[in-house]
Image (cartoon, coloured by chain):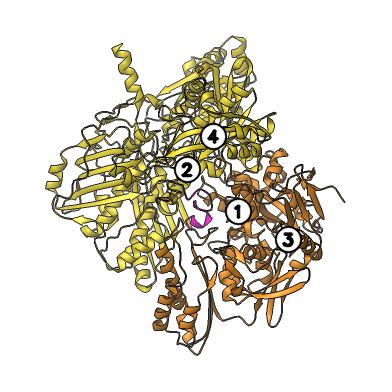
Amino acid sequence: MAAAEITINGRRATLDGVPPHTTLLDFVRAEGLTGSKEGCAEGECGACSVLVARPGIASPTEWVAINACLLPAAALDGQEVVTAEGLGRPDSLHPVQHEMAVRGGSQCGYCTPGFVCSMAAEYYRPGRARANGHVDSEHGPNGFDLHALSGNLCRCTGYRPIRDAAYALTGPPADDLLAARCEQPAPAAAATTIDDAEGRTFVRPTSLPDALRILRERPDVTVVAGCTDWGVDVNLRGRRAGYVVAIDRLAELRALHVGDDRIEIGAALTLTEIERRLDGRVPLLAELFPQFASRLIRNAATLGGNLGTASPIGDAPPVLLALDASLVLVDASGEREVPLADYFTGYRQSVRRPDELIRAVRIPLPLAPVSAFHKIAKRRFDDISSVAVGFALDIVGGVVRTARIGLGGVAATPVRARDTEAALQGRPWTAETVRVAAAVLQSEGTPLDDHRASARYRAAMLGQSLLKLHAENAEQVTA
Amino acid sequence: MSELSARPDRPSVGVAIPHESAALHVTGAALYTDDLVYRTKHVLHAYPVQVPYAHARVTALRTEPALAVPGVVRVLTAADVPGVNDAGVKHDEPLFPTEVMFHGHAVCWVLGETIEAARLGAAAVEVDVEPLPAYVTVREAIEAESFQGAQPQLVSGDVEAGIARSTHVFTGEFEFSGQEHFYLETHAALAHVDEGEQIFVQSSTQHPSETQEIVAHVLGKHSHEVTVQCLRMGGGFGGKEMQPHGFAAIAALGAVLTGRPVRLRLNRTQDLTMSGKRHGFHSQWRVGFDDDGRLQALDATLTADGGWSLDLSEPVLARALCHIDNAYWIPDVRVNGRIVKTNKPSNTAFRGFGGPQGMLVLEDILGRCAPLLGLDPAELRRRNFYATGQCTPYGQPVRHPERMTTIWDELGRRGELDARRREIERFNAEHEHVKRALAVTPVKFGISFNLTAFNQAGALVHVYKDGSVLINHGGTEMGQGLHTKMLQVAATTLGIPLHKVRLAPTRTDKVPNTSATAASSGADLNGGAVKNACEQIRGRLLQVAGARLGANPADVRIVDGVARSLGGERGVAWDDLVLMAYIERVQLSAAGYYRTEGLHWDSSTFRGSPFKYFAYGAAATEVEVDGFTGAYRSRRVDIVHDVGDSLSPLVDLGQIEGGFVQGAGWLTLEELRWDETDGSGRGRFLTQAASTYKLPSFSEMPETFNVTLLQNATEDGAVYGSKAVGEPPLMLAFSVREALRAAAAAFGPAGTSVDLASPATPEAVYWAIEQAREHSSHGHVVEGGNGAVPPQPGADAHPMKPRSEEVLEEVTHA
């Protein structure tokens, strides 16, 4: 077996003996690369953002920005990482660094290396410059998508100069080494086994059967994919697992297939990969993704992870419930398909057994024509919802034929709003129907009072979400 | 024009240049305190033992279990303190407390070979406590009369007469939230023992001299045995003015006791649960207007939430009282101030330092009363601006009040406000579920520390034989661009290109007895000192040049690095001139000093002229609000702001924009939430992570953001005609809040007055919309009679008496 190591800014660093809970951030800082900072240790501020070479969609390799504070260093075995120090030096700035510097994009400078890395990922994104000059409040004339920076917080500048720096970028010059790297194959996933001095182990099996065999033999393992939940547990709650199995690079979990009667999405595809590969094919998902955490998180997080944790406030379940999705669960002896509506059994609990993995999510076709995702949160970018509602309605001749409504944040699990669905189905899509149904929706679930919102507001928002859906879809549907 | 404010030919000041460390920032090469750990050998890591009770007496502390954890080296407790067990200047903040005063209060610290060992060691320490009753909310503390510190009273004229004269009297109440600094770099210190028992502490501190003093008194040493250095901070915003001292002292104590370097860096949760925030306030008020909407009288009682100790609460409260007038003339005023003691971290300085809180009270009053007076809020505001010859309630003449109207009118033109108001009216008539609104609010902010003694600064400037220049000054860099400005001031005064000047990190052994880099005063004070030092050297060099050029030194100028006599052809290059001076044994180093002239302030009577000048500005914000959810966005913001003649326009622009967005965060998004229940978590800080305490992100940036610096704005009383810029722009964000109020009101009938909670989160805006729809048109403002008199101070209330005044009295009486 090859020695475990990461290539950082072109230099190799050994992972020999590194504990599974050592984050990539702590690892690069200990290597003397202190440009990457810890601002929050939970993937919210992006001060730790670094670039990772990943298999691309538009080119063999793409530079992807991720939160180094969440990812175990061990997960990067065999991979290539670039930090702000690797992009340029004070006397030879990278174009991104140059624009940030001259336009006043840094004040205290602490968040800056992270911003630079997130911005560099978007700078190198294949096809960025081919946006045909489409400009709106979130896209620049150079094709720069501001969502690339949605996971980076700055407390000093107010963001305007950072936006201006992003929008001033042109394309990489012909001799740009990182651009050239994109034309070469991406680093393969390594078969990793790293033991630390205290007997903890990080394992990356190379096939699904291998992974499932480990799960059957060791019921105590911690399964990780994008690590966006696991990293928070490690950093904020001091969780130290004895045996960690990474499944995010298993080919069997990374397929996406659009058929005639269903779409099957691999559970270990990142949300960014799904978003780009579906390219708007499922409007409800297209509406979800920009509101799901931040780009930095979406570059790592997977649907399998979002459903595997069974959190009641995950943003994907309300949408997938509205889409009538089901999950393909697999163990060493075979597969079973479980409707998502039957999957959740309690707070952070599901029907998935410890020896099972989520292999894929299936969405039946055709899709309901009227759909929407309403996320209630304080902030438009990168926030956790207090309430989230997914709608998928089939309205024919002004009558609601079917209605599926998924809710998050109103109970111990994501739930379907069955009573509201019943109050809509078979009834005319009129203000009166909606008024009655909204009152029903308002009383579904038992929302909590907490620091995100009051129970009263959460309940009100359920009803309001249906009223809003009607206001926005009243005319085209009844016509 | 004064000598202080006059600029020479071709000055470096006034040129728009990037931050002096920009190239280091963007490449990750800029070093912060905790980055040094990786360059230091044999470092020990400190980790706090935080006790999860809001208020409790410690009955037993067992540290032995921690020592059994592999890698734990030592546990620091009160018994280890050789000097004074206190982390503050008021002697009310024991470094190792025996009484837990807030949820998460650290009672001892564990030192480990690794942070992991220290963390596990801290978890192993056993603390027995006897829980005590706790005050978590301001109302609970007021109810229990749990007050601390002085209760100042600001009186001007006769408030009862003013109320009697008024034709409209309104009474109301308003409680609003504080704000977490959320500097991206958490508190950090790294200490080691140097040669000869000298203690060297690297600290992320806005006030190295005070950090030095506290470290010395904890260690039982003199100030000359302790050196504190601050390379730079990853943000401060006031949060590192007083709160770093205790953390630095822990690191220093650990270093002394173990002989090894000790690093203390709070993780985000620790920083959020242990360090103080902007004070939330409660206010009760009555206000009188005449028939034209002119303010006649204001009677208010402000209660600041001090948290568990005084920290800077008294001066914060003083500034709140001194800014309740904002830009408005009020003939008869009575404002009482008091500070409650609650079981929460000790609230502290935060950009604006009470000014925003005082101003928010009156801006909220105007926003709520304008519809009841039948006046457009912008018109009501403009009608009440100060005019020449009028004084503030504390008796300071308001200089340059015409700048406020100039700014207001320029903002109207640049922001195309009239046309946009018509457009908004049209939009709102056509849209049932979404409304827009535009609001304009002014800022007048007093510059200088209220306490006169703090308005002094020092600098140390060296010119080396090769012509290169190194400057030191007492100010710290936290991103505000102070060092950039100081480089420009030095280059301007010496008459040399900017690249000849370099700046060394702030250290207490270079410049002693410095004031905090705070109160927006960094550039005014340190700029004066740098200029003074450079002038001394320049004066000596002109003698040398004069002799060389055969000219009177008074007729020699150094411009762009060449000394020439007026009208003379021949020049002496800077490097040659410096070398000549050295050979002629002329001193090439100077200590500079500056103190702000013309200030006086009497804390006990609350009268005087504490401010050198006022900074002015105004902002116009347009918002769009969704009637279904209360969600909103800022469509456009226009600002006209007075920075005098800017020292560094790119830096000032950054301060204005950044301050505005930070203010908007305080007023709309950022929510401090505590467990106020009687359950086992009582007093726990609930929003203790970036995932629950939301800062403005890219999505909160105004879609269109235009900032204009007021032109022809020379300030005679400050270095090179500039004005301070750090704090005033934060308060421009009142325009966001007032626009949200107006948009919510637009869902109801014309003339609706709505209450708006602060922060105005989407939920708060939603409830305001509901209030407007139900058109309970007075909100909770009560009109009529002589109003309700707010609570007045008790018999035991005492005025402020700052330490400096006490010292002067002691010395005088001795």
Residue A294: image quadrant is bottom right
Q: Which mark is residue B484?
A: 4
Chain the render paints yellow: B
Residue A298: image quadrant is bottom right
Q: Is residue A336 above or below residue A153?
A: below
Range of magenta residues: B685-702
Would residue B470 be visible to someone looking at this image? Answer: yes
Q: Is residue A478 above or below residue B27?
A: below
Task: Tell me how far mark 4 sits from mark 3, CA to CA.
Answer: 47 Å
Residue A139 is situated, as x and y percent measured from the top left of the image, at 58, 61
Would residue B443 be visible to someone looking at this image? Answer: no
Query: Residue extending furthest top?
Result: B585
User: Which residue corresponds to the image point at 31% horizontal and 47% vertical from the top-left?
Assistant: B139
Residue B358 is situated, as x and y percent measured from the top left of the image, at 32, 43
Give the residue pinned by disc 2: B655
Residue A196 is situated, as x and y percent measured from the top left of the image, at 76, 44
Chain the render paints orange: A
